[in-house]
Image (cartoon, rainbow, N blue to C red):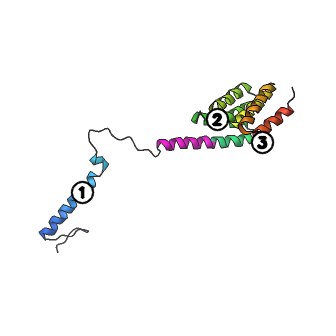
Amino acid sequence: MPKSKPGFIVNNNMKTSKILKITLTALLTLGLSSSPAIAADPYSEPAPAATTESKTNKKSKSKDSVESLLKSSRSSISSKKWSQAKKDLIKAEKLNSKNADVKNLLGFVTRNMNDTKSSMKYYQAALKIDPNHLGANEYLGELYLKLKQPAKAKAQLAKLEKICGTNCAEYKDLANDIAKYKK
C-alpha cells in the first residue's frame, strides 16, 4: 500500500476510491447544507442576534428582581431604615408598576416617614390593583387613624371583615388600633 498522510488510507482499487469519493461528497454536502449559515436563503432577513434570555425569562427575571427588592425592603423596614426601604421599593416599582405588594409597602414606608399624602396615594394604588389586599386595607385604616379619621378606619375594618373575617391578623391588628385610638 502506498504511503499516505496520517489518517488516510490510499487504495489503488478504483471501486473503493469511488465509494470514498461518494461518501465524502455526501457527508460534506449534508454537513454544509444543514448548517444554517450556508443553507439559509441569501435573500431573507438575517436572524436577530442570539441572546441568552427569552422574553419569558426576562419577565421572570424581573419578577425575581422585584422579589429580591421586596425582600431587601422588608429587611430595611424591620430595622426601621425607611429611606433604604423606599429606595428599594421605588426600584421594584419601576420594574413592575402593577405589583400591589410594592405599592402597599411604599405606603407603609412613606406613612412611617410622615408623608401621609404619598402614603394615601400608594395604598389607593395597591387597592386599585387588588381591592382585597389585606395589608393595604389594614394599613389604609391605620393611616386614617393617623389622619384623625376613625370613621374611615372603621370602614376599612368592615372591608377586612368581608374579605377575611374577624380572625385574620390584619382585622385583629386594625381592630386593636381602633380600640386604642384617642382623638
Three-letter amino acid code at disc 1?
Leu
Q: Residues within 10 Å of mark 2 (few under 14, many from 20)?
A: many
Question: What is the span of residues highlighted in magenta in the rendered image?
Answer: 41-68
Q: Quadrant of the N terminus?
A: bottom left
Report the residue at 64% width, 34% height from top: 130
Vertical comparison of 34 with 161: above or below? below
Q: Where is residue 52 shown, x and y percent of the image?
A: 46, 46
Q: Which residue is mark 1?
A: 28
Q: Tag 1's secondary structure?
A: helix
Vertical comparison of 142 with 71: above or below? above
Q: Where is residue 109 shown, x and y percent of the image?
A: 72, 34
Q: Quadrant of the C terminus?
A: top right
Three-letter amino acid code at disc 3?
Asn
* Any part of residue 113 in sight: no
Q: Which mark is residue 100?
A: 2
Report the residue at 72% width, 35% height from top: 162
Viewer-closest of 126 and 83? 126
Report the residue at 76% width, 41% height from top: 169
N-terminal-most mark, 3 or 2: 2
Circles 3 and 1 in contact, beta carbons < 8 Å:
no
Instruction: Give the alpha-carbon distance from disc 2 to disc 1, as whole Å.
Output: 59 Å
Locate residue 125 relative to residue 156 in the image: left or right: left
Q: Residues within 10 Å of mark 3 (few under 14, many from 20)?
A: few
Locate residue 142 relative to residue 133 in the image: left or right: right
Q: Which residue is mark 3?
A: 167
N-terminal-most mark, 3 or 1: 1
Instruction: Give the alpha-carbon distance from disc 3 to disc 1, as whole Å.
Output: 74 Å
N-terminal-most mark, 2 or 1: 1
- The label nearer to you, 3 versus 2, is 3
55 drawn magenta: yes
